[in-house]
């Protein structure tokens, strides 16, 4: 996988105007000084508000990941998708609304889905949308836990200065693609998704999300991502995570419109 300056991958289909909110979030230490009663009350008010936004703006996708190694107040990474910018803006405002919003760490980035060409197409599909089972009520907050069935490698990247001007051969793109393809086959890549920022940051402009079945698979994937010469020309920040209560948050997604 290559950063987007000269990436061989294609961006989202022109007919798909959905907006993805990439959210680095967590709770501030002040949250843990609240009483359990206050935490429960604030959490319920927050969930009710966010579910209202999800229904009003037709939330398309919601998925959370808990980092295995938190970075200060950054503890979770979220992928939140709406069919319009209005939905994304309203979601962000609602998520930061007090009282719950006073106790959160928020870093938001707007992005589009991108689809790398080649072998990755077959693994680049997001999880299928799930309709809530009969009787399920997302307003009722369960005990939230990580899913131990897989590991997720989050790779934040961009080219180092001057790398975008080199040829794909000089950057080692073909060699890296072969390494990733071999890891995908050998270890059973579950899925791969790619998101490109609308406004690139100084240290990243796209993030790849690779879901793999084991630590050995995740380690092999990270070795392929950082292999030379490609790895020496790319600014990379890689984090391991687990999916965060996936069955519960799947209930927040609105079923596709039948129109």
Image (cartoon, rainbow, N blue to C red):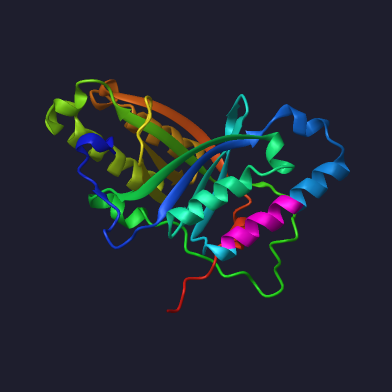
The vertical placement of 213 against 121, above or below, is above
- Viewer can see residue 140: yes
- Viewer can see residue 147: no
The vertical placement of 160 against 92, above or below, is above
148 sits left or right of 14 in the view: right
Q: Quadrant of the C terminus?
A: bottom left
Q: Residue 240: x, y in percent?
A: 51, 34
The vertical placement of 104 against 16, above or below, is above
- Residue at point 20%, 43% (across, down): 8
Q: Main secondary structure of the magenta part?
A: helix
- Residue at point 47%, 46% (across, down): 21
- Residue at point 19%, 28% (across, down): 164
Q: Quadrant of the N terminus?
A: top left
Question: Which residues, given as a range, are shown in magenta?
Answer: 45-54
Whether the magenta-drawn stretch holds residue 86 is answered as no
The vertical placement of 240 against 257, above or below, is above
Q: Residue 180: x, y in percent?
A: 30, 39
Whether the magenta-drawn stretch holds residue 50 is answered as yes
Quadrant assignment, res 25? top right
Q: Residue 124: x, y in percent?
A: 36, 53
Residue nearest the observer in this picture, 217 or 106:
106
Residue nearest the observer in this picture, 180 or 234:
234
129 sits left or right of 111 in the view: right
């Amino acid at each position: 996988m290559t950063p987007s300056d000269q990436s061989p991958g294609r961006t989202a289909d022109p007919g798909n105007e959905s907006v993805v909110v990439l959210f680095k979030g967590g709770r501030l230490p002040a949250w843990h000084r609240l009483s359990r009663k206050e935490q429960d009350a604030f959490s319920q008010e927050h969930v009710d508000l966010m579910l209202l936004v999800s229904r009003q703006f037709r939330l398309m996708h919601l998925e959370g990941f808990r980092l295995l190694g938190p970075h200060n107040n950054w503890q979770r990474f979220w992928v939140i998708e709406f069919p319009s910018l209005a939905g994304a803006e309203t979601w962000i405002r609602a998520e930061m609304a007090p009282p719950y919003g006073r106790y959160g760490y928020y870093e938001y980035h707007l992005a589009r889905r991108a689809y790398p060409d080649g072998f990755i197409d077959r693994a680049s599909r997001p999880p299928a949308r799930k309709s809530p089972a009969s009787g399920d009520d997302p307003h009722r907050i369960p005990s939230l836990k990580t899913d131990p069935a897989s590991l997720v490698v989050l790779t934040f990247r961009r080219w180092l200065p001057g790398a975008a001007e080199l040829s794909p051969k000089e950057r080692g793109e073909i060699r890296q693609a072969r390494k990733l393809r071999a890891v995908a086959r050998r270890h059973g890549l579950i899925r791969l998704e790619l998101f490109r920022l609308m406004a690139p940051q100084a240290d990243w402009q796209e993030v790849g999300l690779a879901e793999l079945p084991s630590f050995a698979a995740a380690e092999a994937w990270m070795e392929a991502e950082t292999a030379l010469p490609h790895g020496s020309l790319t600014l990379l920040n890689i984090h391991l995570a687990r999916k965060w209560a996936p069955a519960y948050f799947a209930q927040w997604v609105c079923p596709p419109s039948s129109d």
